[in-house]
């Protein structure tokens, strides 16, 4: 027979809930939030079989000990029993606006804390709850938008497992079904344009069907909400620069941007249009939406939407706590454990890094994390040093634009390529320091391979090559809408 359990093991088994929302290893402890949710569910489970009514919902609140506790029990019941999701959700609706508000807060919290480890069925049911919040009324739209934004951060495009592809397919299905609601939001179209363009680019070879679905939805969002989509800024341009001209995957998105007819053109640009042919072509580009993206500043939400929370925390830790002398070791930790999925004890990795994950880190360093002078003087790892160390992890790559190393360099020089007065100079510093210090390894782009320059010179040339490649592809995009390229 089985060996007898130790007293502490018997106590843990007795205290453990009989059901679970998340998948975990045997040694992983249950989180405080999941334990709290399951306790409220087990307390209310005997009462949830009755039909929903105002009187019965008040009884649930009294039994649970409060409105939030009652909504927590109903939410877990919806997630665990899909066949009875509708009558169970009616218990919350019977509580009125206060009940839906409490449920919305629980959905936001559980999505940010637990969604990464949710079981597949629970993930699907949570997306069903998102849909119910959307159709419940405008008061719940902010919670639904926040929850969808959180889910976007947990999608790993490099993970081709059934669990990951099912999540992407179901989320795209939800967004397509609620497209009229999506385009009516203020910030969601810009966020989706950026994230869906990255998805379409990353899934091009791994899952062409999902890639085409993401590109089609992104094009539809641009066509329906051109002004809101233009707020995505230059982040949404990066996947378009990586793709070859005429690439069938992103062509629907480029065509939608060209024909969007955005009204981003300002009064000053309208005045200049009457005075200068060059300004007139720039005005046409602005109306088409492309110039609005190229010249617009990126939203912080758009950058963070592509960076999973564990990776963001690791990058911030290295840039704010780690001395420069230890940068290489910590860059290896990020590249091997978080980007490649080779987990160490206590580290939950991203399952498989996508082609753009290193570029997402570069965009975070350039566009979001701007260290203060006091932090820079403290001797911690500079952004350029971390990016050089990550680029050197891909030293074997021939630095084509589509390779991970090429994408990282292109992400570094994007703000340099599109710089205009008023932009943050801090966004340029990583690329400028890479070009001046030669911190990159010996890998050189094909254009310079025959010259066999020294290691430091090769690194500088590689940054300049990325800048040149970005400029050529930006000009190609501008030519699509008849705009003149920027002056050299």
Image (spheres, rainbow, N blue to C red):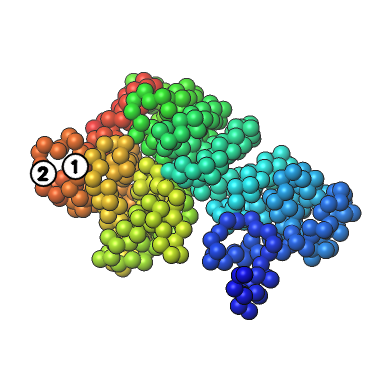
Q: Does residue 237 appear anywhere in the picture?
A: no
Residue 156 image point, x, y percent: 47, 45
Q: Is residue 401 left or right of residue 455?
A: right
Q: Distance of mark 1 from mark 2, alpha carbons?
A: 9 Å
In the depicted view, which residue is nearer to us: 253 or 354?
354
In the depicted view, which residue is nearer to us: 388 or 222?
388
Rendered image quadrant of residue 414: top left
Residue under pointer 1: 444
In the depicted view, which residue is nearer to us: 56 or 365?
56
Residue 229 image point, x, y percent: 51, 34
Q: Does residue 82 appear anywhere in the picture?
A: yes
Mark before the other along the chain sequence, 1 or 2: 1
Q: Quadrant of the C terminus?
A: top left
Q: Which label is found at residue 133?
A: none
Q: Quadrant of the N terminus?
A: bottom right
Vertical placement of residue 259 versus 293, above or below: above
Give me the residue at 21% from left, 50% from top.
440
Mark 2 burial class by Cα count in 10 Å: few <14, some 14-19, many 20+: some
Proximity of marks 1 and 2: CB atoms separated by less than 8 Å: yes
Give me the residue at 51% from left, 28% from top.
216
Give me the residue at 47% from left, 22% from top.
259
In the depicted view, which residue is nearer to us: 239 or 222?
239
Q: Residue lying at the far front in this picture: please name it.
A: 1
Mark 1 burial class by Cα count in 10 Å: few <14, some 14-19, many 20+: many
Label 2: state its secondary structure: loop
Q: Is residue 194 left or right of residue 82?
A: left
Residue 480 image point, x, y percent: 37, 22
Label count reads 2
Residue 310 image point, x, y percent: 46, 57
Vertical placement of residue 304 versus 233, above or below: below
Residue under pointer 2: 453
């Amino acid at each position: 027979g089985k060996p007898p359990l130790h007293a502490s093991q018997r106590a843990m088994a007795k205290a453990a809930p009989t059901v679970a929302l998340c998948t975990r290893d045997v040694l992983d402890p249950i989180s405080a939030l999941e334990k709290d949710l399951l306790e409220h569910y087990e307390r209310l489970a005997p009462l949830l079989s009755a039909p929903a009514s105002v009187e019965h919902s008040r009884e649930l609140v009294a039994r649970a000990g409060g409105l939030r506790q009652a909504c927590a029990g109903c939410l877990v019941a919806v997630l665990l029993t899909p066949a009875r999701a509708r009558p169970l959700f009616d218990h919350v609706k019977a509580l009125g606006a206060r009940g839906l508000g409490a449920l919305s807060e629980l959905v936001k919290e559980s999505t940010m804390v637990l969604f990464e480890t949710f079981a597949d069925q629970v993930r699907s049911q949570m997306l069903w709850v998102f849909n119910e919040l959307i159709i419940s009324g405008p008061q719940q739209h902010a919670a639904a938008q926040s929850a969808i934004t959180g889910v976007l951060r947990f999608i790993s495009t490099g993970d081709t497992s059934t669990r990951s592809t099912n999540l992407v397919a179901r989320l795209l299905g939800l967004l397509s079904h609620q497209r009229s609601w999506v385009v009516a939001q203020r910030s969601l179209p810009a966020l989706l344009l950026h994230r869906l363009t990255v998805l379409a680019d990353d899934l091009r070879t791994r899952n062409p069907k999902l890639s085409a679905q993401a590109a089609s939805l992104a094009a539809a969002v641009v066509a329906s909400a051109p002004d809101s989509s233009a707020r995505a800024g230059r982040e949404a341009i990066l996947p378009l620069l990586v793709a070859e001209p005429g690439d069938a995957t992103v062509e629907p998105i480029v065509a939608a941007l060209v024909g969007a007819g955005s009204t981003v053109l300002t009064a000053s640009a309208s005045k200049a249009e009457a005075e200068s042919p060059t300004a007139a072509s720039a005005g046409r580009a602005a109306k088409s939406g492309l110039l609005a993206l190229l010249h617009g500043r990126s939203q912080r939400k758009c950058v963070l939407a592509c960076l999973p929370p564990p990776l963001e925390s690791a990058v911030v830790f290295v840039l704010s706590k780690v001395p420069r002398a230890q940068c290489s070791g910590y860059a290896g930790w990020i590249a091997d454990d978080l980007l490649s999925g080779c987990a160490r004890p206590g580290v939950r990795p991203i399952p498989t890094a996508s082609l753009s994950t290193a570029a997402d880190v570069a965009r975070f360093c350039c566009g979001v994390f701007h260290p203060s002078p006091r932090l820079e003087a403290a001797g911690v790892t500079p952004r350029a040093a971390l990016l050089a160390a990550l680029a050197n992890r891909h030293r074997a790559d021939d630095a084509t634009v589509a390779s991970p190393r090429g994408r990282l360099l292109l992400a570094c020089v994007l703000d340099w390529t599109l710089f205009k007065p008023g932009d943050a100079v801090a966004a340029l510093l990583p690329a400028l320091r890479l070009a001046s210090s030669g911190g990159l390894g010996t890998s050189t782009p094909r254009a310079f391979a025959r010259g066999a320059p020294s290691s430091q010179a090769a690194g500088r040339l590689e940054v300049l090559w990325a800048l040149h490649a970005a400029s050529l592809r930006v000009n190609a995009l501008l030519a699509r809408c008849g705009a003149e390229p920027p002056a050299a």
